[in-house]
Image (cartoon, grey):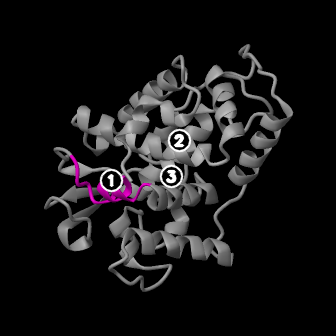
Amino acid sequence: MDDRGGSFVAVRRISQGQCHSSSAEIVAGSTAWLGRGLSCVCAQGRESDPRPSFDLTPTQEECLQSIQSRIDVPYDSSIPEHQDALKALWDTAFPEEKLHGLISEQWKEMGWQGKDPSTDFRGGGFISLENLLFFARNFPKSFQDLLRKQEGDRSVWEYPFAVAGVNITFMLIQMLDLEADKPRTLVGATFLKFLAENESAFDLLYCITFKLMDHQWLAMRASYMDFNTVMKSTRRQLEKELLLEDITRLEDVPSYRLLSK
């Protein structure tokens, strides 16, 4: 995700509980927020570094291959399934507002960088859209609270919702080491146990992480320049919670309680 073109979008809040363009100013900034800046969230190691490897059961191997196949799918705006998923995301997020097209200024209301969301999926692929749609459908209250920034004492300059969601997908893939043949961290190995029991574990963990990130954002009284710091803090907290004793499913993770349906 390094050195890619484009710019991030920060949203300046004008009034509480509104996310439409009539109540916000859109500000362009450096690519560091989405691209180069995100690299510092993920552990940086040399190929020569000794890293442990964890053996997997046949079921866990199958689950890992399944999630890897999802990760490998890029978003392609020419594929009807991808188009339909993007339309469904809009309809779920803004049921009261008709979408005028897959390329439209309306998308900025959701926190995409421009009028064509497909340009923002480069770092997360199609799975990042699936994650957002899963969040919207399964935890609609939390989704809407984050989308419309309805909870807490918000910053004047807020993080863009949708682009933050793509960043979270990318961070989780790196944190869980999901592109490796076998997990090389205890956190990654632990997650595969959850995935073997629940095929939607990655999507569920995404929802937990998004809500936890916003919780950390508010606790740190962060503004958009603090996004990477918040992401680092979120990752550390999530890793701690996943490795707690007596956690047998993701619903047992303390931050799951932050979610509302």
Crowd around label 2: few <14 · some 14–19 · many ≥20 (10 Å): many
Compared to residue 8, the image places residue 18 above or below, namely: below
Q: Secondary structure at mark 2?
A: helix
Direction from residue 222 to residue 31 in the image, left or right: right
Between 62 and 155, the one lying in front of the other is: 62
Q: Residue 254 location in percent, x, y?
A: 42, 29
Which residue is at 26% across, 70% downward?
20
Give yes or no for contact between labels 2 and 3 (Cβ–Cβ under 8 Å). no
Q: CA distance from mark 1 to mark 3?
A: 14 Å
Between 127 and 91, the one lying in front of the other is: 91
Disc 2 target residue: 205
Q: Residue 97 location in percent, x, y?
A: 34, 81
Disc 1 target residue: 146
Q: Is residue 61 visible?
A: yes
Crowd around label 3: few <14 · some 14–19 · many ≥20 (10 Å): many
**Residue range corresponding to the magenta coloring:** 139-151
Q: Amino acid at mark 1?
A: Leu
For residue 7: magenta? Answer: no
Q: Amino acid at mark 2?
A: Leu
Compared to residue 227, the image places residue 103 above or below, namely: below
Q: CA distance from mark 2 to mark 3?
A: 14 Å
Q: Residue 211 location in percent, x, y?
A: 38, 43
* View extreme (top): residue: 50
Q: Main secondary structure of the magenta part?
A: helix
Q: Residue 87 location in percent, x, y?
A: 51, 76
Nearer the observer: mark 1 or 3; the answer is 1
Direction from residue 194 to residue 140 in the image, left or right: left
Q: Tell me the quarter of the picture where residue 77 sits.
A: bottom right
Q: Which of the marked residues, 2 or 3, is nearer the chain's N terminus?
A: 3
Q: Which of the marked residues, 1 or 2, is nearer the chain's N terminus?
A: 1
